[in-house]
Amino acid sequence: MRIALITYHRALNYGAVLQAFALQRTVQSLSGKKENCKILDYQCKAIEDMSVLLHIDRRFLKDMIKFLPNYHLMKRKTEKFRAFIAQRLEVQPLKNNDLYSVENLFDRFVAGSDQLWNYEVCGDDDAYFLDFVSDNAKKYSYAVSLGKITAFEKHKDRLKKHLAGYSVLSLREDFCADRLEQLGLETRIDIDPTLLLTAEQWNKEIPSVNRNGDYILLYCVAPPKSLIQVAKNLKERTGLSVLYLTDLVSARLQREFTPVFGQGPEDFVSLIRHAQYVLTTSFHGTVFSILFHKHFFAEVENLTGSNERIKQLLKITGLEQCGNEEILRQGNVISLEQWNASDERIAFMRKNSNGYLRVVIGECDNESESD
């Protein structure tokens, strides 16, 4: 069974590239044949156009002249991403970006994971709905997210039209599944691909990058004031330096924290792996903090985009306390029993999702065998 994946594998985004890597690795492992799973090397204009220069927070415009000397570091980040994609992902080339030319090369097509069905991200591109596949029996998804609820309401008729013919609709969040079920579509929930690999597997796949000294890792695009204050307080309480993983940082934050520029996917994983604390607004920053058993705080109360996704992640892993700033101030020590319980929950969901993927690759006859 030859499987084609379509996802945001070319985005200069840590979570996007790492989830693509994890899903492909898992399918390859389950099938036993590396060559049987390819990522379609599709170039979506909206994704290709994304860059930090096009998505600058207005608060940082006055600091642009101070950012320009770091242009070479942004270039280094791009080079690291391109190297990771070229060396670690198995892609199916597309002549003239033509998806229709590959339908007969694969037995099944899987859309996923990430916010593929969020038009605010993909820029009105229907390719991620597998519109180029004429045989509905070949269409599957894996842990797709719809993004914001407002975006769903705007495009719900269009979503129903594109998704009605899928063999199986797999989503990542309950609130996404609820909305599609309101449209009369049957769904299932699966974990994000990055959780399909254990911490031990990530340690094996992604080598460590040496870091000197203990540190607090702050990772977010534009940190809310509340998270900046959390970082300051934690720095003062622990005496640890704060490494701020970023592409663009204001002059004020540069004085208070140590910016870390030009990092690739492997650096991202390593930075979280070796941190004493992680402070983040990122879904995948939260995922890896959980996998590596980090002391962490995920800001969920002052966000408009990813808060529901992070809240559900904390809920299903039993770590809701890590979204509570007051508990962080009190120390937020996660007990060994809590980590064991979290690991057991993830292992159960991983087993269920692996079972579904076995259905996709044809090792099981029906979805019930994945339960």
Image (spheres, rainbow, N blue to C red):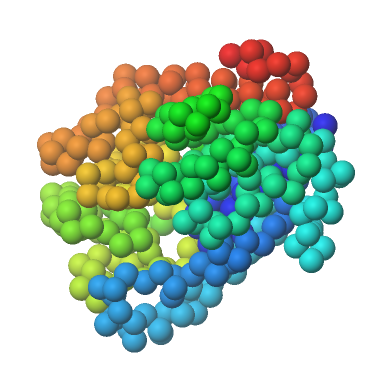
> From this viewpoint, is residue 205 visible?
no
Q: Residue at x 37, y 47 (%)?
A: 150
Q: Residue at x 25, y 38 (%)?
A: 323
Please provide percent x and percent y for residue 308.
34, 39
Say whether residue 181 is left or right of residue 126.
left
* Residue toward you, 236 or 309: 309
- The quadrant where residue 229 appears: bottom left
Quadrant location of the C terminus? top right
Please provide percent x and percent y for residue 68.
40, 84
Please provide percent x and percent y for residue 311.
32, 36
| Rendered position, 71 above or below 105 | below
Say whether residue 235 is left or right of residue 128.
left
* Residue toward you, 95 or 334: 95
Please provide percent x and percent y for residue 116.
55, 48
Q: Residue at x 60, y 40 (%)?
A: 161
Q: Residue at x 73, y 39 (%)?
A: 109
